[in-house]
Image: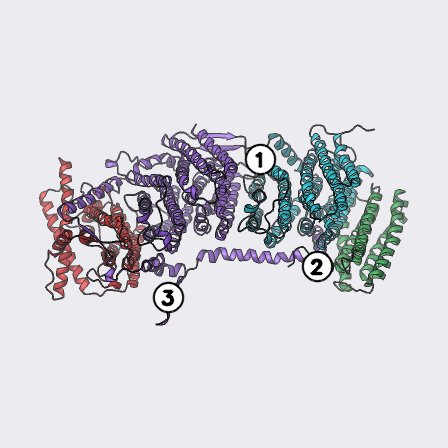
Amino acid sequence: MSRIDFDVAHLLAGSLVLISFLELYQDRLYSLLNVYAAHALVLAASVAWQAFVQDAPHLYVTAAIALLFKAIVIPVALHRIIARLGIHREIENVVGVGLAMLAGMGLVALSMVVMLRVTHGADPLAREDLAFALSVVLLGLLMMVTRRNAVSQVVGFMSLENGLVLAATGAKGMPLVVEISVAFSILIAFIVIGIFLFRIRERFDTVDVQALDRYRGEQR
Amino acid sequence: MMTFDALTGVLLVPLAAAALLAMLPGYRVSARLNVVATTLTLVCAASLFFKRPQPGPYLLVDDLNATFIVLTTFVGFTTSIFSASYIGHELAIGRLTPPFVRFYHAMYQVLMFAMNLALVANNIGLMWVAIELATLTTVLMVGIYRTHEALEAAWKYFILGSVGIALALFGTVLVYMAARPVVGEGLDAMVWTVLVKRAGAFDPALLDVAFVFLLLGYGTKVGLAPLHAWLPDAHAEGPTPISAVLSGLLLNVALYALLRFKMLLAANAAALAPGPLMVTLGLVSLLFAAFMLYRRRDIKRMFAYSSIEHMGIITFAFGMGGPLANFAGLLHMTMHSLTKSAIFFAVGHIAQAKGTQRIADMGGLTETHPLLGWGLILGVVAIAGLPPLGIFMSEFLVVSSTFARAPLLAIILVAGLLVGLAGLFLRLNSIAFGEPRGPVGKPTASYAPMFAHLAIVLAAGVYMPPALVGWFQNIAGLLG
Amino acid sequence: MVLIRDFAYQGAQMLLVLALAPLLTGFVRKVKARLLRRRGPPLLQPYLDLVRLTRKEVVLAESASWLFRVIPYLVFAATWVAASLVPTFRTGLLFSWSADLIAIIALLGSARFFLALAGLDVGTSFGGIGASREVMIASLAEPAMLMVVFTLALIAGSTQLSTIAEFMASPQVGLRVSLGLGVIGLVMVAIAENGRIPIDNPATHLELTMVHEAMVLEYSGRHLALIELSASLKLLLYVSLLACLFAPWGIEAAGAGVPALAVGIVAYAGKLAAAGFLLAVFETSIAKMRVFRVPEFLGAALMLGLLATLLRFVSGSF
Amino acid sequence: MTLTIALACSAALLALGAAAIVIGRSAAATRVVYGASFIIAAISLGAGAAHLLAAAAPQTMTLPIGVPWLGAHFRLDALSAFFLAVVDLGAASASLFALGYGEHETAPQRVLPFYPAFLAGMTLAVLADDAFTFLISWEFMSLTSWALVMAHHRVPENVRAGYVYLIMASFGTLALLLAFGLLAGSDGLYAFAQMRAAAPTAALAALVLILTLIGAGSKAGVVPLHAWLPLAHPAAPSHVSALMSGVMTKVAVYGFVRIVFDLAGTPAWWWSVVVLALGGITAVMGVLYALMQHDLKRLLAYHTVENIGIIFIGLGLALAFKAHAMPFAAALAFTAALLHVFNHSLFKSLLFFGAGAVLSATGERDMEHLGGLIHRMPQTAFVFLVGCAAISALPPLNGFVSEWLTFQAILLSPQLPSWGLKLLVPAVGALLALSAALAAACFVKAYGVTFLGRPRTRAAETATETDGFSLAAMILLAALCLLVGILPGLFIDALAPVSVALIGERMPAQLGAQWLSIVPIAASRSSYDGLLVFLFMLVSGSLAAFAIHRLASDRLRRAPAWDCGYPDASPATQYTAASFAQPIRRVFGTVVFRAREHGEMPPPGDGRPARLTVELSDPIWDCLYAPLAAGIGLTADRLNRLQFLTIRQFLSLVFGALVILLLVLAAWS
């Protein structure tokens, strides 16, 4: 694999991590969604690049899914939900942004340490990609646990999943990648519909997860 | 037109049944069809003992998963019988409407299909997909009552489950990455039989990371503390047959996945030993669940926690490893599936008879419903690991074999067992004994499945057929 | 021939204790009276009392059961057997091996057990008082006694009274601390067991102070006679026990011949007289203590016994 | 052969239990079940006794059940044979008693299925020859007896008793399980034969001893693990109480002997220190607890604790002598302990039967509501009196013999070289003497308040004599008490093979001794002749009676009680159990139980009755069990908060776990 391929892939993966940080930084839902759209966009690009590098045409499908579904459909849908629920100005971080950023740094460092210990038998591209993918996953998870609002939790989950796709596509010649990405898209669709459903059924007046937690089988 | 073999039967029958049930309206017909389908599946699974297809790139049947398949299909079969009467009652009292019942039956078969697929999958990717499918179906069924609690439980299950799935996928990818340089690109790098053979040459560091993610990912499904959160509510709020299937089967399937990967790591000398991790998680789950039993007010949630406890014990046993402990783990898992599903059958009938799941509202069950009451007592005695029932033997083997190797662990284990037992009986006393409380109406239901399970457990506690023993010992050897 | 002679000895001993017991009681009373500058009852008064009582009819409480009527005989039998197994003038009696010192204590224990039951049988409050106090005293006196027995047994290497007595008579007993403690302990126990001052007052019927007398309050006639007789037998038993253990001089070793026998009898009589006199002096010179001081008194005895035993255990084994 | 019979019997009992589930509700069920179990137990008893008396060689048998690759090993050697005889004698008499008593049972279908199973469990426990079979029978025994305790589950105390019992039983079983785990090693040599061959190291053996003391001790009721016993034993139906107290605790003793004397290799000298100290404390604490009770059955249960203490003192002495290679003395102590096992099973069953007869006649267990029963139920009163005298160790009954032997063993112990024992043994001797004296006091109270005096309630007034079966059972046991008391030599000799098997030495043969007396070591040293003492008392007593009735008056007049001139006071003025125990409570209770008395005396002219309330606190429960329960409750509360987290918080748990694991991984190398 030539030098330039490696650099491009590295660049894209790294920027994905960067955008994850941006997501952590957002405290408005709309802007969060926009950043996420960018996230998905970069992912699509990197997947496409991988498809090109590994000349594995089926990966283009994944790229397309990322582009259409994640970068366009989902954000739009969420936009509309937020509009319906009128929660667009909610700021619902559990810990301050700064702290979240610091934690993010720590996580990235951790994933680097863990991954770079991988013996050098594995080819460097894959290793770098893996490290980045792991950081994206961890950052997504961090986002899920630092946000109260269900929508931003979903966003967190989706960026986590982007990390997975990054890893999967980075794994050269891995079969079933397309299927898996499709499966995941379905999963996300479920989640979105779920939120939507709660709204439509007039069961929960807000999608704040704490509202769900009121009903906990056995009351204290 | 391919020739029909048992393996495809195990997969196709549920699928076809699902499609059929999705179309059938009437409750009676679909319930019967449900039973018929599970029976057929069971027959196919049983026939796997005699004639076994060659492992292909996608499907595989070996000693290990043959046991799981037979167990799964059997419990699926008995549960379908139980669910026939249970769902009938739910219809009668209007908790479920016919459309939901139709949906329920279809989903039941899909779940069966997904679990069987996960078990026979010879491909880590395929297995992952199957387990995800199983999760989604159960999510839908947990929410089927559409009450606040049910939806909340389903949502919780859904979110935590999805995260678990994601972690598991990452682990799977890592395994592939580890395998690729050795096995070469493409499908082979995800095929069990190949992986296990070549695992010695894999990059150990990568395998370690992979195992961490797999442990957490599939561990969420197994319900190990602190990943357990979805389990109690899902059990408590879903329809009882589903609780039985969850506790009895789905947890096993997830555990099966873990075992597979454990074998993978065990095959690689340089990789970290998966044992300590599993032992730690197992003990944590055991102690945690044991203490959680004390403050339970909902009968189904209580037994859900006891499932966590036992998953902890089983994980501990497999973590300890060695022929005795592995044997005990397998035995414990089988016995737990049978016993716990039997308990949930009993609990389902009790909840319907008493019209509530609150422990405070039931009492003196052995007076009002002797069969149910003593059935429940027998079940709890079994699950608490008292002789002469099967779980006693597995606990005997685990504890005695552990104490000689790691006394401290054994003492923690014993303490957990004792605390759990005390918690279970604290509640059982108020349910089964004392002045009768609540309605005394008899539910029109067949207790056959419950007592069938208990009979098997009792028999196994006293006498195990040599064939089965040899079988288990063989597997225990495989697990290393 | 030998067997017959041994039987004769055994029988003689049994009759002797039976005959002497009231006399000892009377003697003690007489001396006490003299010490108090009273003339006091004649020496043989106890015999006359017994005869009179046996001639009288029994007035039995309505609520009394068959047990109430059997108990006097049981008590008498147990006490008499016990008393007849203690060497008085001669060791190595025919049946002396049939019950060692522990068994003798146990026999007295069963006598007390039944007497206490008798106290409860009629269902009056005084019987209850007597019984409960009696068992409280016994529950401390018996262990103390056993401790003393342990000491002796460890010294003489036997729990067999004859053996112990012979050993005590033999020169190889030096002066021993444990022995001293033992004798004090035994005396205290003896005082308590026989309900003498300061534990109990055999003469009074002042309800709240009495123990033994309260138990037998409901007895009359021949039953009372038997009870009284067993009481004096018990006193005699303890005296001869003390005598043969701590003053074993002159006791005839088995088969030492007639002169020795005579010596033995005379010595025995002398010892009884001395003991009686001492007892009387002691009782006249001390006041009765409150019932709840008794545990301390007996606790002291128990401690002495335990101390003695410990000493024996530590200083050499046999 | 005998082993086969015994196993067949237990199988038959199990089958009987299964059958009882079906026929439980029918009228004839009681007769059928108890009759059948009587016959079966009698056969099994015959087998055990025959094997013991013939001093036959051990028989073994392996059945293809239990742990698959191991099978279920059974073995009938001298020890098992002796305990088999004890178990089945108790079982037979209990079944006989229940033939009558069972008719009063309100919920027979809750008793009948479990009763034979319980018997089978105990029988199998003494026959088992591998760890798994032993533990499964052991715990099966606990489980069935638990079910029997729960028979009258509508009474809240019973439910609580059953709960405590089950937990303590499982605790003990787990301790034993650990002990066996040590003996079996990591490759699972579970057969006792293999364990004997293994010969564990000193440290290992020490741990085994501790675990066995916990395991078997908790079942036997060794203080401080006795807490369940006085709750559970009285809660069960009386014939079951008799079995639990008289027989099941002996199975526990069997477990202790089997492991410590047989499997755990050669004892170290300090083992005996532990056992002796525990035994002494148990004996005294048990009897003190008993003195404070006024519930008849609970009093009896506490006395079981005391007797277990005496047995353990004997076993401790045996261990001490064995450790110092003094086989003769060891044999004496060991035989004393075993004989006391047998004796206690006799009179404790007898006493519980009596309590059961009283219960079914009056419906009362509280002695304060009884009294004067000797008039209404004379036979019961008589046999109960025999039982009381026997358990109070009065000659010429059997209780005295075993305690006498124990004393003799104590008197041998100055020869022990180790100083710890030199100091401990006399103290233990004092404790033993104290407990014996207190026991006598306690049974004066029990018998006097229950059977003597005047009836305190209507129920006691209208009581009627119990039925023939129950009487037959009680008379049988009473006769045995007397027989062992006057002819102890027979039974001591019968025990010889046991002590030969486990100690390697035996007591001198007794039947040779003159006049059937028993001679532990040498005639010059000590000897006792129950027969002669019995005859002596008989002769002299009847002699006196004859003489007086002949020579003096035998006239008798009934009149109101004298009572120092107070005319017929009401029965309420009698001494109650509480007031009877008051002096002893003042002496010991204030220290041990922090007993406090509050007297409340209304002013003159006030009609209210004066009240005296006594406060007792159970030191062991307060110091050991209450804090434990509180701790568990607290932990449960704390952890229970985890049930009420939000999804996000749960996710953060997962997240935290992931990060921690990754950190561990990063730190790995």
The foreground one among B437 and C20 is B437
Q: CA distance from mark 3 to mark 1?
A: 64 Å
Chain letter for the red colouring in the rendering: C
Q: Nearer the viewer, mark 3 or mark 1?
A: 3
Q: Which residue is mark 2?
A: A214
Kindly indicate whether the residue at mark 2 contacts the one at mark 3 (C-beta within 8 angstroms): no
Colour representing chain D: purple
- Say few, some or many: other residues with alpha carbon within 10 Å of mark 1 (under 14 / 14 to 19 / 20 or more): some
Query: Element under label 3?
Result: loop
Question: What chain does mark 2 sit on?
Answer: A
Tell me if D214 is positioned left or right of B280 in this view.
left
Q: Where, by quadrant of the figure, is residue D582 drawn?
A: bottom left
Q: CA distance from mark 2 to mark 1?
A: 45 Å
Chain letter for the cyan colouring in the rendering: B
Task: Give the percent coordinates (x, y) of residue A88.
Answer: 83, 63
Colour representing chain A: green
Q: Which residue is mark 3?
A: D609
The foreground one among D548 and A91 is D548
Q: Nearer the viewer, mark 2 or mark 1?
A: 2
Task: Give the percent coordinates (x, y) of residue C50.
Answer: 14, 53
The foreground one among D458 and D551 is D458
- Say few, some or many: other residues with alpha carbon within 10 Å of mark 2 (under 14 / 14 to 19 / 20 or more): some
Query: Element under label 2?
Result: loop
Task: Give the percent coordinates (x, y) of residue D383.
Answer: 32, 44
What amino acid type should be assigned to the residue bearing mark 2? Answer: Arg
The foreground one among A181 and D179 is A181
**Are tags 3 and 2 found on a single chain?**
no
Q: CA distance from mark 3 to mark 2?
A: 57 Å
**Are tags 3 and 1 found on a single chain?**
no
Question: What chain does mark 3 sit on?
Answer: D
Q: Which residue is mark 1?
A: B459
Q: Nearer the viewer, mark 3 or mark 2?
A: 3
